[in-house]
Amino acid sequence: MNRHRDKIKILFWDTNGFWLYYRRLEKGRFKWPCATGEQDALTINQHQLNWLLSGLSLETAHSHKPLNGLAVR
C-alpha cells in the first residue's frame, strides 16, 4: 500500500511460483485497516480481499446490516 492509498500490490504463491497482482485506483482510496504495532504484512481471507478490492472497509464485520422482522408474501 502506498502513501496515497490508491495502489496495492499482492504477492500470491501458486504451486510453481509467485503471482504479483497490482491494482491502481483512478479515483478514491483503498480502505486499509489501521496499523497495529509494527505489522508490515496483513493476512486476510478471500472474502476480505474481495471487500477490500471493492472499496469496503475490513474493520466492519458485515457489508450490510442484517434485516430482521421482514417477511416475503
Image (cartoon, rainbow, N blue to C red):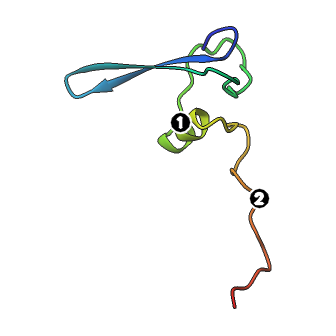
Image side of residue 41 versus residue 62, left or right: left
Q: Percent x, y for residue 6?
A: 64, 17
- Does label 1 or label 2 sit earlier along the sequence? 1
Q: Amino acid at mark 1?
A: Leu
The residue that appears at 70% across and 36% down in the rendered structure is 57
Q: Secondary structure at mark 1?
A: helix
* Residue 20 higher or lower than 63, as above or below: above
Query: Residue sitting at 52 percent across and 44 percent down?
Result: 47
Which residue reaches farthest right? 69
Mark 1 neighbour class, 10 Å CA radius: few under 14, some 14 to 19, many 20 or more: some
Q: Is residue 8 above or below residue 48?
A: above
Q: Quadrant of residue 35?
A: top right
Q: Quadrant of residue 16?
A: top left
For label 2, the crowd category at 10 Å Cα-Cα, with few meaning under 14, some 14 to 19 and many 20 or more, is few
Q: Quadrant of the C terminus?
A: bottom right
Expressed as whole percent of the image width and height from the top left, the position of residue 58 reads 67, 37
Considering the image in quadrants, where does the N terminus appear? Answer: top right
Q: Which mark is residue 49?
A: 1
Q: Is 70 left or right of 63, judged from the image as shown?
A: right
Residue under label 2: 65
| Residue type (three-letter) at the residue carrying disc 2 | Lys
Image coordinates of residue 55 in percent, x first then y, are 65, 35
